Amino acid sequence: MLGYKEVRLCGLTKRFGPNVAIAGINATFSAGEITSIEGPNGAGKSTLLGILALLLRPTAGFLRYGDCNPLDHPTALRRTIGFLGHASFVYPDLSAMENWLFHAQLFGLSLEAAKARIKVLRERLGLGDFIFRSTRTYSRGQLQRAALARALLHEPTLLLLDEPSSGLDARGVELLIEALQEEQKRGAIVVMVTHDTELARRLSTKRLRLRAGGLEVQK
């Protein structure tokens, strides 16, 4: 996998037809930091995560993963990214365990390494025996924790989270906080979109706000 310690955005712009979702933003996300992206609906937060996850291409400007241009190494870079979106990205007819083992193969983990990592994540996220049932039977909170484990499974360099506390009860939120603090200690670059100001306050080393496509530091 490619190694990098920061992701830089320079003049990043994204348009959808005549609509400007992101307007020429500059930012740096660094290893060992948790950055929260806050702002009203429609400000471009999810669009920004989509660009960082290499799911969307910017209209103008550029981004760099360390010294790496994503246009040169898109597949290799995607292997370094963990992404938790609004959708769970798990197959509903498979159990969480089956989903994780499939995901591990896609990211080149051996069966032994995958099982060892799953054991750690089960304990860290409080995942019970429901992980052996079809994911279509899960509650919203169970599905969110299973999806978070999927995003963490391959120990990503860059972890991108879109409303990670969605559907979680109080205990689930505490487990989420502990898990992300462990990722921070590991040296991951963590970028989190959230409307939960208390979560942002507790977790973030840097808080940014998107407003009308522009980015500013949140005090």
Image: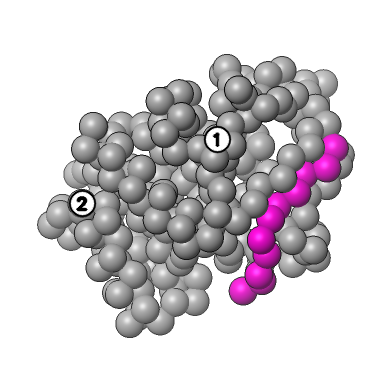
Which residue position is annotated with label 2? 126
Residue lying at 74% horizontally and 67% vertically, measured from the top left: 73
Residue 54 in sight? no
Can you give x and y, in whole percent of width and height, for residue 23 in the image?
80, 27
On-image quarter of the C terminus: top right
Given the image, on which type of amino acid does mark 2 rest? Gly
Crowding at mark 2 (Cα within 10 Å: few <14, some 14-19, many 20+): few
Can you give x and y, in whole percent of width and height, for residue 119 in the image?
25, 68
Q: Nearer the viewer, residue 103 or 191?
A: 191
Q: Quadrant of residue 19?
A: top right
Q: Nearer the viewer, residue 108 or 33?
A: 33
Q: Nearer the viewer, residue 2 or 73?
A: 2
Residue lying at 41% horizontally and 49% vertically, measured from the top left: 180
Q: Is residue 187 left or right of residue 70?
A: left
Which residue position is annotated with label 1? 36
- Name the element at disc 2: loop
Given the image, on which type of amino acid does mark 1 rest? Ser
On-image quarter of the N terminus: bottom right
Can you give x and y, in whole percent of width and height, for residue 156 in the image?
52, 62
Residue 7 magenta-drawn?
A: yes
Report if the CB atoms under discs 2 and 1 are less than 8 Å apart. no
Residue stretch rendered in magenta on the structure: 1-11
Q: Is residue 205 left or right of residue 113?
A: right
Residue 9 in sight? yes
Can you give x and y, in whole percent of width and height, for residue 112 in the image?
33, 82
- Name the element at disc 1: strand
Quick check: 205 above or below 75?
A: above
